Image (cartoon, helix red, strand yellow):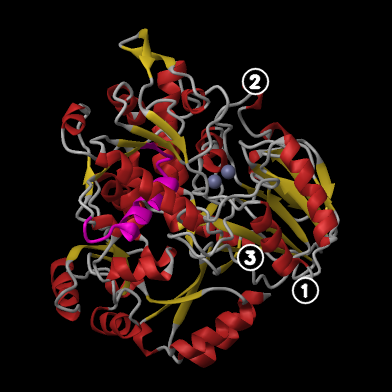
Amino acid sequence: MILKELKEDLKDILNQEYRIEPLATGIYVYVEHPEEVSQDSIKELVKKFKKRVYIRKDPAYLRDFDEKKTKQKILKLLPKDAQVISIDFSPDFSEVFIRVKFPRYTKDPELVQKILEKTGWYPIFVREPQLPSAYFDSLYLYKIKTDRKGLLKKVGKRILERADDEVKWITATMLGGFREIGRSSLLIESNVSKVIIDMGVHPSPPTPEDAYPMINLIRSLESIDAIVISHAHTDHVCFLPYLFKAGYEGPVYMTKPTLDLAVLLQHDYISISKKTTGESIYDKKDIRKMVNHTILLDYGEVIDISKDMKLTMYNAGHILGSSIVHLHIGEGKHNVIFSGDIKYDRSIRLFDPAYTKFPRAETVFIESTYGSQKMPPREESEKRLVEKIKETVARGGKVLIPAFAVGRSQEVIVTLFENADKDWNIPVYIDGMVYEASSIHSAYPEYLKASVREKIISNDSPFNWEYLKVVKTKDKSGIISSEPAVIIAPSGMLTGGPSVEYLKLLAEDERNTLIFIGYQSPGSLGSKIQQGMKVVPIKEDKEVKELKINMEVTTIEGFSGHSDRDQLLAWLGSFAHHNKVRRVYTMHGEQKTIMKFTDLIRRKLRIPASAPMNMERRRLR
Ligand SMILES: [Zn+2]
Ligand SMILES: [Zn+2]
């Protein structure tokens, strides 16, 4: 038994009384003097047992602490320019959350040691976003104030109960997002445990039956050990709160920024559903329940999520916090990679290209969104975007860029910031959820490309660029009557939201330009205008009116957060052979594209590949 062995080792290392508590996040070891424990010996333990080990002061010694005095002690120990926003204590774990504006030293081990020595509390630094946000504040407070020890204990116990039964078989059941884009969900199951990856909704389902993952294929929610979320897009995370409404009580794993962005999207999903159909499949309280059950990870951390499965999440290069999911099953019996949505491209501004150095992989699930398409290089697209903006401004017009609030918008902001020369004097307005999503980006510089991260840390950030302006009013006419401007607003397909409000105000003036930078789904207003319709129906105070499109309409490709055909093949090819990948399953693509792409993998990479359908179950071992 692992705990027994660990206890023996701890006795030798600690030289003091201790008590251990196995939790979902790792093993907590409580002692009287945590500051005396050498970090190197703990690192060895972690390596040996492949479990995370945390040494903390026994909460019993801190029970009667003086909060005010301790705060003052901590403030004295912090550098002068720390700009502390708040200090909050978590007595269950003897941890203290220190929220700071200045981020440079947030991982300074000497500072951690000093605070631990002088106060007994283990400090965890949290970064304040550069763009202040009430949404971020309230979610932050909610996250640190909720009592999660019960859940962490329950899950910890379930994982550590040693699996007597050996892993005999492993299967994959396709719950959604196969031969389609939308409602992504996959069940990985062994004779020992069950894990689900992703829980999305279909943003524009062909029929109502195609809207949600096929959870009727799961025998019971209680039998699910864990849910893992690859990234915060509607088609990967917006069905999740419904499972909590339906009675799921287990843990969910995702990266830190994914949770912040997911909650934002889920609230938006509720309000859009209510507006369009008058009802919603879940409520705010179900989202809160999801937050209470979420265990947050960083890239590269290995964590046990069931008796026989270990999870690691790697950068996917697609949006903030997006990850490739790696499952290590049955002590090396089998390894599964779920790509999520990936961007494998060095030239994008915000993120490093998708990770490729996996330790092992036998089965790979790969997205296929642009599996049969070639895209123009990013540099070219950027040049065209800047030229188009300057051209429009020169004739006294304004530019409207409808964009997804999460991902594409921030890529455009950083592109304009990086391309702005000395003479740049064009304000860039951001509206609606674009602001909140940008604020979340500015709070997690460690998830961004090194060049952007450095800029944020040294306060030369694209997110506090002097030309970036925030629209907080419902009335957009002030912006329209002012000087030339660029406006970035959701929704990306002109299906509602501020982008449509701006369109109404800008469409009839031929000096203005509408620039599409993302996918327009068939039937959406965006698609109609993109295809050249000059008069479109538009809702105005419950009446449908005609809107004349006199403004210039143009499409600039290449800003996608998805890899194109060659990038997908390059990503897979970079690890498939030396990892001896046995089979590839394609997913997340339209039927035609996915068949072409599956064939390409077979021919170009010579790996067995197939395109499973929803409801299929395949045996992996
Ligand atoms: Zn996505
Ligand atoms: Zn997706």
As drawn, 505 above or below 593: above
Which mark identifies residue 578? 1
Mark 3 vs 2, N-terminal side: 3
Q: CA distance from mark 2 to mark 1?
A: 43 Å
**Circle 2 Cα neighbour tier, 10 Å, few/some/many (<14 / 14–19 / ≥20):** few
User: Closer to the camera: disc 3 or disc 1?
Assistant: 1
The amino acid pointed to by label 2 is Thr
Label 3 sits on a secondary structure element that is helix
Q: Please state if 168 lies on the left or on the right of 103 as rendered.
A: right
Dot 2 corresponds to which residue?
207
- Quadrant where ligand 2 appears: top right
User: Do labels 2 and 1 touch, CB within 8 Å?
Assistant: no
Query: Is residue 558 shown above or below 164?
Result: above
In percent of the image, x 61 and y 51: which residue is there? Answer: 340
Quadrant of the frame with the C terminus: bottom right
Q: Please, what secondary structure does the residue beneath circle 1 have? A: loop
Residue at image point 53% right, 42% down: 237
Give the CA separation, mark 3 to mark 1: 33 Å
Q: Earlier in the sequence, mark 3 or mark 1?
A: 3
| Residue type at tag 1 | His
Residue 118 locus on image (x, y percent): 23, 83
Name the spot of residue 603 as percent of width and height, x first: 85, 56
- Residue wearing tag 3: 160
Q: Nearer the viewer, residue 255 or 314?
A: 314
In the image, taking residue 353 as reference, residue 597 lies left or right, namely right
- Rate crowding at label 1 as few (under 14), some (14 to 19) or many (20 or more) other CA atoms within 10 Å: few
Q: Which residues are magenta?
A: 401-423
Horizontal side of residue 72 vs 557, given as left or right? left
| Residue 63: image location, x then y, percent | 27, 68
Local crowd at mark 3 within 10 Å, few (<14), some, or many (≥20)? some
